[in-house]
Image (cartoon, grey):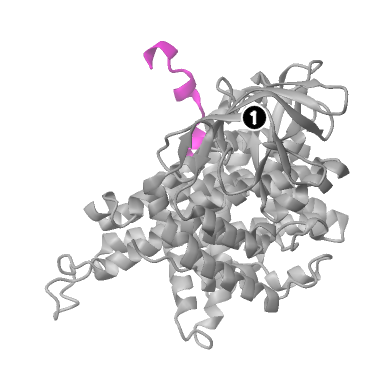
Amino acid sequence: MANFKAPLRDMRFALYELNAGDELAKLPGYEDFTRDLIDPVLDEAAKICEEVLHPLNRPGDEEGCTWDNGVVRTPKGFKDAYTLFREGGWTSIACDPAYGGQGMPKAINVLMEEMICSANLSFGMYPGLSHGAYVALHGYGADDLKSAYLPKMVDGTWSGTMCLTEPHCGTDLGLLRTRAVPKGDGSYKISGTKIFISAGEHDLTENIIHLVLAKLPDAPKGVKGISLFLVPKFLPKDDGTPGQRNGVACASIEHKMGIKASATCVLNFDEATGWLIGEPHKGMRAMFAMMNTERLSVGVQGLGLAEASYQGAVAYARERLQGRALSGTKYPDKPADPLIVHPDIRRMLLTQRAWIEGSRALSVWAATALDKSKHHPDPKERERAEDFIAVITPVVKALMTDMGFEVTNLGVQVLGGHGYIREHGMEQYVRDARIAQIYEGTNGIQALDLVGRKMPAHAGRYLRQVFHPLSAYIEKTIDKDGMTEFVEPLAKVFGRLQQATAQVARSGMSRPDEAGAAATDYLRLMGFTVLAYLWARMAEISLPKLATDDPDGFYKAKVMTARFFMERLLPQATAHFQAVMAGGKTMMAFEEAAF
């Protein structure tokens, strides 16, 4: 297995040069987060990921979690690593200082999340789910609940989960059967079964705080009748320490394709004591606040695994001797040339690189918008950032997890048979990446969210926060010296995205199946367009540096990768455009009995 090295140089490029990370300190509440503070944090995050988490990745996959009579144990080394992680303050980095957090901008946290996912995704699931639970409780919980639970969730001595799915319902949460009955003292008795609960039971923390969707006795039908409840594994005593065991038990853990060191649990709630978060029947609002945070994080999971796979593929391609270069021997002193001389190997490596660096730029762009939506002093700027987040979140989640699976598969292909066996660790990345396309809303659901909710919302207002910056950039840059080769392909794909948007909007109003049939291809088309915009900008930043400030060839590689994206990857967007414009007749007219 290749050693993982955090791609700090490119991370800093995406943060500072592409997304103006230095300006984060101008936002209220972020005044301390200058480069002098941010850079050492990134360095230390890289160190713990490289030296502590990554060495546990393969052994954790091989050992997996164990379940014995309701007790779940994580693999050897995970508890010690979590203690080190917690004591280092990493669980609190993006949390409110009022509850012991460090208040770090999301734009910084997303880079740390990427490193964790590259080093050990299974480990990252535990603090990742806790942060999602923190977001929901922080945003919608009553002050007494927040005071009692958030400090320990922030410092990592307690962890959190999100309990949505039931055996008979996943995406269609209106069908859920878990019930919450008022006790008369402000608490509720929660009963029901939840499945696929990541980090639902484990031995890393002294308490686990479950956020549970359930229905009150007087609940309206469907999703409008869902409430959200806080249900601790242990009921806190008066002094805040864990006390009596609550009525929640882990019935089993799943045996999965990947992320085997992450405990995926079946949880039975048997009149467990819980407390309402937010208003009755308004639980989906709080849960979506949590899920939107998680969807960006899940997109970053695809990115992190892709980066780890790319590093392994490059290392192997440089070392493995296989055949001679088609254009003539490149290493006459060796019995064969290394794989990296061959065009098809370079195609795969550059495909990995272009997807990864484009997706990293996208993740920081989205995270920066999240920071602005919460901290910008101008309400109009906050609204614009919120609109952008609304439309880009499904794209980030679906595009970057699809990319993660594609790129990790390419990593296996570069190694050939040695990629398929366990020794080099490449096949684990493929298995781990596959789930990210499914959980937190499958990628098909993300596409439906984009065309069915985000596109028509407020007469297309959300879309303007993507379309307007692209249009303005094209107009400003199309005739700029050296930029034509990057901006012309962007202009063409943007024109196709506009056409496809009009087509989906027209057909979707009268024939919803048409919009549904177009959804996945439309999301991919938007994703390609956004990445083309980011790659054009990255090329624009890099070109002036080539002659004056490029001792290590970083900017030259950036320009060449931008050219590869425009010439070899972006043409795929045409196929997605044509699929959207073809409509859904061929799939919807197919007789059900013929499947």
Q: From which residue to which does the magenta span run?
A: 578-595
Q: Position of residue 179 (x, y in %)?
A: 72, 20
Q: Against 359, is 437 above or below?
A: above
In this rendering, position of residue 65 left or right of residue 465:
left
In this rendering, position of residue 465 left or right of residue 436:
right
Q: Which quarter of the image is occupied by the C terminus?
A: top left
Q: What secondary structure is the magenta-colored segment mainly? A: helix
In the rendered image, which quarter is residue 166 located in?
Answer: top right
Q: Which quarter of the image is occupied by the N terminus?
A: bottom left
SS state under label 1: strand
The residue lying at 46 percent from left, 50 percent from top is: 403
- Visible residue check, residue 263: no
Q: Seen from this angle, which residue lies furthest top?
A: 593
**Depth check, front residue: 349 or 105:** 105
The residue lying at 61 percent from left, 50 percent from top is: 128
Q: Where is residue 187 in the image (x, y as percent from the top left)?
A: 82, 28
In this rendering, position of residue 386 left or right of residue 73:
right
Disc 1: CA contacts within 10 A as few (<14), some (14-19) or many (>=20):
many
Q: Mark 1 points at which residue?
A: 248
Q: Does the magenta stretch include residue 460?
A: no
**Depth check, front residue: 95 or 446:** 95
The residue lying at 74 percent from left, 58 percent from top is: 371
Q: Against 543, is 99 above or below?
A: above
In the rendered image, which quarter is residue 224 located in?
Answer: top right
- The amino acid marked with disc number 1 is Val
**Depth check, front residue: 50 or 417:** 50
Q: Position of residue 581 (x, y in %)?
A: 52, 35
Q: Seen from this angle, which residue lies furthest bottom?
A: 548
